[in-house]
Amino acid sequence: MLRSLWSGVSGMQAHQIALDVESNNIANVNTVGFKYSRASFVDMLSQVKLIATSPYQNGLGGQNDFSVGLGVGVNSTTKVFSQGNTQNTDVKTDLAINGDGFFIISPDRGTTQNFTRDGEFLFDANGNLVTNGGYVVQGWMKGDLKNASKMSDADFFKVDNTGPIQNIQIDPAMVMPARASTKISLRANLSAGKHVEQTGNIFALDSAVKTPADGVNPVYDSDSRLTQKGEDFAALFNQDGDAFTLTENQGIWVSYKTSEMRNEIQDSNEESMVEINGTTISFTNDSGVSGMSSIMAAQMAINAHKHETGVEAYIDNGLLRLENKNELDGDERVKNIRITASGTGAFANFVEGDADITSFRYRYTSSLSPDSGTGQFRTTEDLRALMQYDANLIKDPTQPYADSTASVSVKVNKYGMFEIQNKDNGDTEKQNLNIFVSGYSSENVTNNVLFKDTMKALNTASLVEGGIASSSSKIGHAVHTSSVDVVDSLGTKHTIRFEFYKSGGSEWNFRAIVPEPSELYGSSPSRPNIFEGGRVKFNSDGSLASMNPPVLQFDPKNGADAPQRINLAFGKSGGFGGLTSVDKQSETYNINQDGYQAGDLIDVRFDSNGSLLGGFSNGRTLALAQVALANFANNAGLQAEGGNVFSASGNSGQPIIGAANTGRRGSVSGSKLEMSNVDLSRSLTQLIVVQRGFQANSKAVTTSDQVLNTLLQLKQ
């Protein structure tokens, strides 16, 4: 009876403990990171009356033991570390573990280590990352930010987690130092089409300055400060953005005066014949029959061939005056006045070789060294020099020609126009010119109408000496510009502007410009902030062939480090990842650089690796620290210290420390918290079961009490 009484008492005691455990679970249903426990019941050691026996050989079978249990006890309270649900909190310093592992925290700045699943972290006044209970979170720190300028972009998001862990402390007044730009990356297309939307005026050319067109050492006009540089005509465009696409020997005629020739016509009844500009002209005149003089007959015969020769005849004071205004397109057969075969009869005074040349043919050649003696040109400077030379000789054949003394100046003005001015040479004679541009064509060469129409704007009936200049239409080159801000070692921004212009069929030149007083090494002494001479060549498929120079050297002129080398990453040879030149509009897809200004820390957040990312006012993000995780051989062996804090015990094993997503450690999620894993429905059900168990054990006690009372009553 006493055994049953004490068994009932032990059952009540055990169920009381279970009730305590379940009540604690229910009480912590909303505790962040809480792990519920359960009471583990075990029976008490039995009182053995008879031991079990084995079968005897005499035929008796074996017998079981005779033992009576002495009640129940609670062997342990087991913690169940199942995953709790995660909840968004919008607090950037909150952190939740998904999977196995514990945050490492310390109450004494790293000397003692404790562990928790509660990631409700915050920063204290000294920048320590702490729990609500003031424990300092442990992990790895980035180190001195002075070396941030030497980090690659990938290193910005890495923290060295191979060393010992330490307190995570972030200076709230942290400043990221500036990083000087070392590379500019550009992805863009430079149009290879025959029509472009963006054109810029060709470079101005001063008529009094001889300037090499190599672009390496440009000379600047002291007045206009514009680059003196000849450009390949084959790469140029008219004012509407249509490409001239000049081919070999295409060109124009430029007439500076009307060609004139006067000669006397002899009376003759015989056949009269002469060859003018390669065309044979003949007539037979019997004045007695026709009533027409020989001079009138000669005039009619010549004018009948006007569209073949360009020459028109007039009678002037008894002389036959020939005139060619040089207005017809074509070859030599319609230009100037040339007697190409001596005359007979009435034309006996016309001698082969006589000529009046006032119109000159200028033809394009792709040769790098055109022969100016044959009127060949390649660049704008070639054509300018030819026109100026010929115009001055036509105006005054007696004056030796020199650029410095030319009374007719031909230049390219700042608007990209060829401009002819007939200056007053100081004598009493007024020598006016009349300009007419026409197209050249032959059996093998077509008339380039776009080029002719552009230059025809020069046409003027009278280019008066000392009067205003005559100009062509605008001539442009295809252009494209891109700009990017680079940063010097002090963190100061400087805008670099790249100006690309087409210089050949598959070639573009570019220049780089920075605001003054900054300088670019290799630039002209007169304009040190402009680097000229960049060249880009493309393959036949539009991919990049070559680019030069690959590096710019920059001097900010503000006390920052100099020279600052900036690599121009404009693409790989044969690739389409940088500059291309295909038949589509010119546009920049992306241009960036790797420098940045100094920045203040303005925001923090965690990533999935537990790295604490700092956002700075310069737009950069840097991993400042990384939270460490620990896991154990036996999580249930951890000793609860209260306040969501655990400590290692002899049965938990030593902590195995590492980063999230390594070993058996789970991942982490920022701005989230792991909630309690208590299942309220299970706990309430278990509470009922425990209650019924307690009631049943109390019934055993009362029953034993009744039996004792019965025994006591037997004496009565």
Image (cartoon, rainbow, N blue to C red):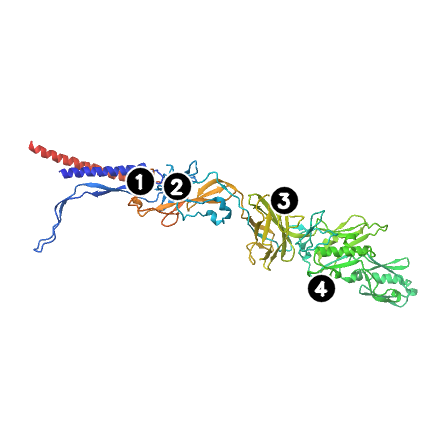
Discs 1, 2 touching: Cβ within 8 Å: no
Query: Which element is circle 1 on?
Result: strand
Residue type at mark 3: give it: Pro
Q: Is residue 565 left or right of residue 651?
A: right
Tell me how many marks there are. Answer: 4
Pick the residue in front: 652 or 254: 652
Residue 444 is tagged as: 4
Mark closest to the chain's N terminus, 1 or 3: 3
Looking at the image, which residue is at 38% across and 49% down? 662
Mark closest to the chain's N terminus, 1 or 4: 4
User: Within 10 Å of the Cα at label 2, are there few (<14), some (14-19), or many (20+) other Cα atoms?
Assistant: many
Tell me the CA gap for discs 3 and 2: 51 Å
Tell me the CA gap for discs 1 and 2: 18 Å
Pick the residue in front: 336 or 67: 67
Discs 4, 2 touching: Cβ within 8 Å: no
Tell me the CA gap for discs 4 and 3: 54 Å
